[in-house]
Amino acid sequence: MVRVKRIDRDSLDFPATAEALNYPNGLLAVGGDLSRQRLVNAYRQGIFPWYEDPQPIMWWSPDPRSVLFPNEMKISRSLRKAMRSSDFRITTDRAFHQVISHCAGPRQESSTTWITNAMGRAYMELHREGFAHSFEVWDAQDTLVGGFYGVALGRVFFGESMFSLASNASKMALTAAVKFMTTLGVEIIDCQVESDHLNSLGARNISRMEFEEFLSESTVNAGVATEVWRLDVQAREVV
């Protein structure tokens, strides 16, 4: 029986990603903590946390990896039409806490959530430090109806979770985000694990090795100032 390595709280080191399990796909290690230093170190290597209470913290590096290249984003005819006729407004970093709270809500297929209280606090700290960002969709009454968040390191954006309380809201958030991040020079958006929803928007699988080639020091350390993460547009302005 293969045992998953346990991380020492006193060390920020992770096992080599090639040691990740084939089943469950990508499980690399357990333990450690969710400190800013450990999380940033993990993302730089393409490693992310994913677990539910009362499980220990689990760290993952799946193979293959689902990614979205900005120039491969697919906007369906129906989504274009919906955005053109929409009175929704899309912003960045206006309501990070609200977005993560909505994303942490139980899904229809499960009564649990992987965004634990500890996870929420950790990403709030990343947000305060300028690493984590949210994209929000607001209706005409200025009510939050959709959005998603993730971690930005240089020219890589690691998408974490999204939610939608109105038709197409999360798709509109992602569409606006991709267009916006393209202007910042973002080269790849990590989607972590394949899903039909993300595939319909242009995401595809690449090997772990290919993904890690994108995580070169020049890519994840490229400077993108926090203050440039400012977006406030009508959905119809995006397409």
Image (spheres, grey):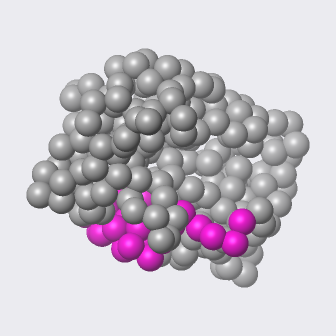
* The one of 133 and 64 positioned closer to us in this rendering: 64
Tell me if 23 is positioned left or right of 175 in this view.
left
Q: Give the residue at x 74% y 75%.
A: 140
Viewer-side residue, 96 vs 32:
32
| Residue visible at 54% across and 26% down in the picture | 64
Q: Can you say which quadrant of the picture contains the N terminus?
A: top left
Judge whether residue 119 is colored magenta: yes
Residue 34: quadrant of the picture: bottom left
Residue drawn at x 18%, y 54% is 8
In the picture, residue 197 is in which quadrant? top right
* Residue 127 spot, x, y in % from top left: 34, 65
Relative height, residue 30 to residue 222 (above, below): below
Res 127 visible: no
For this view, does 155 lie left or right of residue 106? left
Q: Position of residue 75 (x, y in %)?
A: 75, 36
Residue furthest out toward the front = 1
Q: Which residues are magenta?
A: 110-138
Q: Residue at x 39, y 48 (%)?
A: 59
Please count the marks in the image: 0
- Horizontally, residue 40 falls left or right of residue 69, namely left
- Quarter holding the C terminus is top right
Q: Position of residue 144 (x, y in %)?
A: 65, 74
- Quick check: 78 left or right of 219? right
